[in-house]
Amino acid sequence: MIFLLAVRDIVRNRKNSIIITLLISVITALFFTGNSLFTRSNSGLRQSYVDNLTGDIIIEKKTDVSMNLFGANAPVIEDFFSIPVIGSYLNIMEILKGFPEIQAYTSQVSVQSYFEVFNFRSGALLCGVDAATYFDLFPGIQLVSGDFLKAGEYGAMITRERAAEIERVSGQKLEIGTPLMFTSAGDIGFRIREVPLAGIFSYTAKGRFINDVIIIDVQTARALAEIQVATSDVEAGAEQLSLLDNALNIDDIFGGELFMEASPVNPSEGGAYSEGGEHTELGGVSPLESALDYFFENNENLSDLSGAGDFSSGGDWNFIIIRLKKGADSGRVIKRLNVELQKFDAIALNWRFAAGGSAILILLLQALFNAGIALVGFAGVIAIINIMLIAVFRRTREIGTLRAIGAGDFYIRALILCENGIIGIFAGLIGVIAGIVVLRIVNGMNININNELIAGLLGGDVLAVDFSPFTVLLSFLTAFVLSIIASIYPVETAVKIQPIVAIRN
């Protein structure tokens, strides 16, 4: 009965109903279109980073400031923070084996440096990787030329876009094996390393940030980041401990028969000058090599202290990157991981924290957009309230008559709320349909995005917006809530109308 009366009143007051419907429809269409764009952007950005750089989850050392893969997630103070290494690395790796949701994982050392080749010089974001596991984790990394890095190999891989930029600036084409120089600054000065170009690759993701990434062997990355290689798997034996005995004199290392006597040579044949100015040669053996031979002679097991010769599988790391099986709930896995990681002063975070600025910026933009929609909605609600108040005053006699024949406050409230609820649902339907039409038009135009920042934020270089059932439901809910909120004050005004006053009017 109430529903039929509500429909009749909507038809009878169709002018007011149409105005209210249009207001709510416009707000709903804006909300639907904007959030569909942000939903598509979030989805595309997530897929790009998960497939190319961050995985689903990262594990890092717990600090006061959350870290992304290349620094702190704090724009103003990020330059004052260095990325810490994870403690108890091997214990954490054992924990990961107990999670059936985890498909694979790898480790990474990150460092920012300057990159130089030919006459080209630029900043670079270095990923020092465990080459044995890294490339299997990221299907978005596609080889263009050369080879992928191998475990224990020194070398670097740059993006196709970076290679093209180098050729354009320097006029020289990069060849596999070309030496690349990396420079980083630390507490004790500058560190310079040179490694050959092992390969050129491309990411399926777009954006200037990701094009600046260089994949490098972890040995070089650790040296540039001033990370000391450590391991807990090796115990020093009696022979190694004997080197620390007091009987060992420093003169035994750098004196006596340890170094070969220098002999004069012809300067044109190479060699080194002695203190007296005479060109001398150490028989092809440097002092450092001789010292190392002294330490490791008859102590082959001592080499285990350096990580068994392969630094890619041991030592210190900044991050552990995890890829989950399809359908696994990353939030639930992160929660369980953090319970286990507490005792190791480490923390698990999702891909958005690992990606850093661009991924967090999308959330901020979406929040700002919805804040703007909220302001528009507030203005719309005020306009609807005024329209409905006028309609209520015009229906004073009708409402008074209903109350005179026994209609209580609940009945009056239900009648007006039902009217506006129907208008809200109908307006939501119109708004969503209008939004879908706009999205189809935009998708059909195949708009190319030339700006790398915008392309990176939207997860592709072609503007395409997906249809999201969740956004549709949220848009309907928004339209309905707006109509109900706008009804509260007019309803309370209507129930205060006394029958005798209504009859007199």
Image: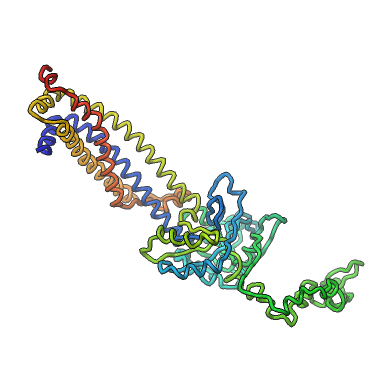
Kindly identify the residue that appears in the image at 77 percent across and 73 percent down: 244
Q: Nearer the viewer, residue 88 or 190?
A: 88
Instruction: Describe the colour scheme in one phrase.
Output: rainbow
Q: Residue 483: where, in percent of width, then height?
A: 24, 36
> On screen, 250 above or below 6?
below
Q: Residue 258: where, in percent of width, then height?
A: 83, 77
- Report the side of 343 relative to 254 (left or right): left
Q: Residue 134: where, in percent of width, then height?
A: 51, 68
Residue extending furthest right?
Answer: 276
Say which quadrant the C terminus sits in. top left
> On screen, 345 above or below 470?
below
Q: Nearer the viewer, residue 447 or 230?
A: 230
Kindly identify the residue that appears in the image at 32 percent across and 35 percent down: 377
Say which quadrant the N terminus sits in. top left
> On screen, 123 above or below 25?
below
Q: Using the rendered view, name the quadrant where residue 227 is placed.
A: bottom right
- Report the side of 27 relative to 200 (left or right): left
Residue extending furthest bottom?
Answer: 298
Residue 269 appearing in the image: no
- Count of labels shown? 0
Q: Nearer the viewer, residue 12 or 286?
A: 12
Q: Nearer the viewer, residue 96 or 265?
A: 96
Kindly identify the residue that appears in the image at 66 percent across and 72 percent down: 306
Kindly identify the residue that appears in the image at 60 percent across and 65 percent down: 316
Residue extending furthest left?
Answer: 405
- Report the side of 416 relative to 290 (left or right): left
> On screen, 474 above or below 312?
above
Q: Residue 109: where, in percent of width, then height?
A: 58, 62
Residue 427 appearing in the image: yes
- Report the side of 354 relative to 1 (left or right): right
